[in-house]
Each structure stands twice: as structure tokens, then as C-alpha cells.
Amino acid sequence: MRQEADSAVLPVAATRPRASRRLLTSDQAIAIALVAPSIVAIAVFVYGFIGRTAYISLVRWNDIAPDYTFVGLTNYIRLMDVERFQIDLKNTLVFTVTFIILCLAVGLLLAMLLDQRIRFEAVFRTIFIFPLAISFIVTGVAWRWLETPSSGINLLFDAVGLDFLMNGWFTDPNIGILGVVLAAFWQMSGYVMALYLAGLRGISEDVREAARVDGATEWQSFWHVIFPLLHPITLTAVIILGHISLKIFDLTVSMTGPGPGFATDVPSLFMYQTTFFGSRFSQGAAIAMVLLLLVSILIVPYLIYNARNEVQR
């Protein structure tokens, strides 16, 4: 009888959850403890502040005294009618397109030259990458002197007989933003060169040899075989350079400021002056949200593209 009773209890006991089973292992608990502070900090100091900025852009706080009267999209509508902001958007477009094209073209060219295993390659590679170690503030100060009409580059052109190349650079309202582009391009082209050089060195020599065996010239081999393999590098470079150009601030501040007729002005500088000098906090928040939208348009598709590639792998 006792054996029958025990056999009857066993199935019931087997179906009960083990009291000793833990929800988390020690490794999982340690991992959560290490990651939690970062998650909390990002939630508060990144997304929390983004939410706060979005809220401020929807109220009537355009004076020193806070005014949280809800006005909806009024600040955005008024912002689009501001002539300075319209000029800023145009400057941003010119800066972004010119900056990206120059960096990609020169960066790829330098990478192709260094990929030929030339003498003193390490020296040239260091020289090209060195500007990346300098902050945009330092670059702006140096290039402000270089592009001053009475000194710098103009004196060099005058000395070598290239007077027709002398101009006002950032002091010229017609080409002012291109002077800033030149400084930014000088600093970032070496970074793009490093990206492309890493990509070229990662392509097997067998791929190049197969193209030669098929009768392709060096140009055809590069354009139809090598360059398509560099598309991920190009996409990464475009995203990084586009992100930098959309939120450029320190280079413009240290180099030119808004410039004559806002020729070198950008939205981030307009936001800074509007908020902290004009005390128009809601309008400044609206500019910040427009900048966030522009950056998101560039970044989010790239993140989705990468996520889909990871899932397919």
C-alpha cells in the first residue's frame, strides 16, 4: 500500500516547479548590473532631454521667464518664415553635398595611391591621417588665418603668380560656406582615406587576378570589380560625413561665425545664438528638433539596412 501511495505522489511532485530554480544566473545578474547604469544614463540624458526639447518647442517660452502655454506647431511655422533659417538650410545643403563629394573623391584617390605599396607609405599615411587628431576648434582657428584675404593662401597664390585664384574666401558672401568646406575637407579626407585603404587591403589578390585573366584592364577591374566591393565602405563614409556636416558647429564658430549676410551660418549656430543670447528657448528648441529630424532621415535608414543584413546573416 505504501508503495502505491508513493507512486501516486511522484507524478504530482514531478509537475511542481522546482523551488530552487532561479530566475537569473549569476552571470546574467552581473551583466544586467553592469549595463543598467548606462541604460539609465542614456534614457535620462539622451532620450529624456530629447523629449524635454520637443516639449519646449511646442510651448510659448520665448523670453527669460518660462511660459509653458501650449502653442502646437506655431514655433515651427514661424521658424520657416525666418530668412536666416532659410539661408542656413541652403548653406547646410551646399556644405553637406560638397563636403561629402570632396572627401570621398580625394580619400579614395589617396587610398588607391597608398595601396600601390609605395616607399614611405607609413609616413604618408600618418601625414594624411594626422589632421583627424586635431579638434575642429583648432582647425577653425588655423584656417581662419589661412583664408584671411590679406594673408595665408592669398599670399601664396600671389607669390607663385596665381593671382586669379585669390579671393575673399569666407568673407565673400557668394562663396563663404565653401571656405568652411575646405577646412572641414582638409580634416576629414584622411579619415576617409583610412576607411578605403582598409577596404582595399581586405580584397583578396585572387579577385584582382581573376579579373586580369578575364581580360579586364586595370580601370575596368577597379570600376567593375573592386569599387562595387567598396560599397559598404562608401555607405559608412557617407553616413559619418553627412552626420558631421548636418551638426557642424565648432568649426563655424571658431572660423567665421555667421559671416557676412549669414554666408557661413548653419542651423546649429543659429540655434545656439537664438537660445542663449536671444532667450528664445522655444524657437531654439524648434531648430534643434529640425536638426534631429534631418539627422534621423540620414541615420535611421542606415540602421535599418544594417539590422536587416544582420538578420540575413
Image (cartoon, helix red, strand yellow):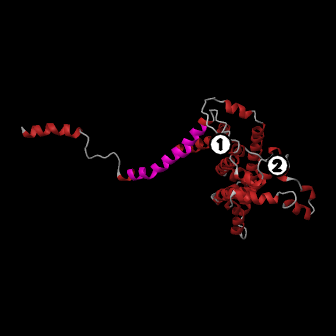
Q: Nearer the viewer, residue 270 or 143?
A: 270
- What's the residue at 69%, 61% (across, down)? 134
Nearer to us in this view, 163 or 215: 163
- Give me the residue at 85% from left, 60% from top: 153
Which stretch appears magenta? Answer: 29-54
Of label 1 and label 2, which has the lower sequence position? Answer: 2
Q: 31 left or right of 52?
A: left
Q: Which residue is mark 2?
A: 176
Q: Seen from this angle, which residue lies furthest front?
A: 65
Which residue is more in the foreground, 274 or 217?
Answer: 274
Tell me if residue 36 is in the magenta stretch: yes
Evaluate whether residue 312 shows in this view.
yes
Residue 121 vs 100, above or below: the answer is below
Q: Which residue is mark 1?
A: 295
Q: Quadrant of residue 186?
A: bottom right
Mark nearest the camera among 1 and 2 is 2
Residue 89 vertical position relative to residue 153 in the rendered view, above or below: above
- Is residue 213 visible in this depiction of the protein? no
At label 2, the amino acid type is: Gly
Disc 1 residue type (three-letter): Val
Image quadrant containing the N terminus: top left
The circle on residue 262 is none
Q: Is residue 217 above or below residue 276?
A: below
Furthest-bottom residue in view?
A: 120
Percent across and percent down for residue 172 are 86, 49
Which element is circle 1 on? helix
Name the main secondary structure of what is drawn in magenta.
helix
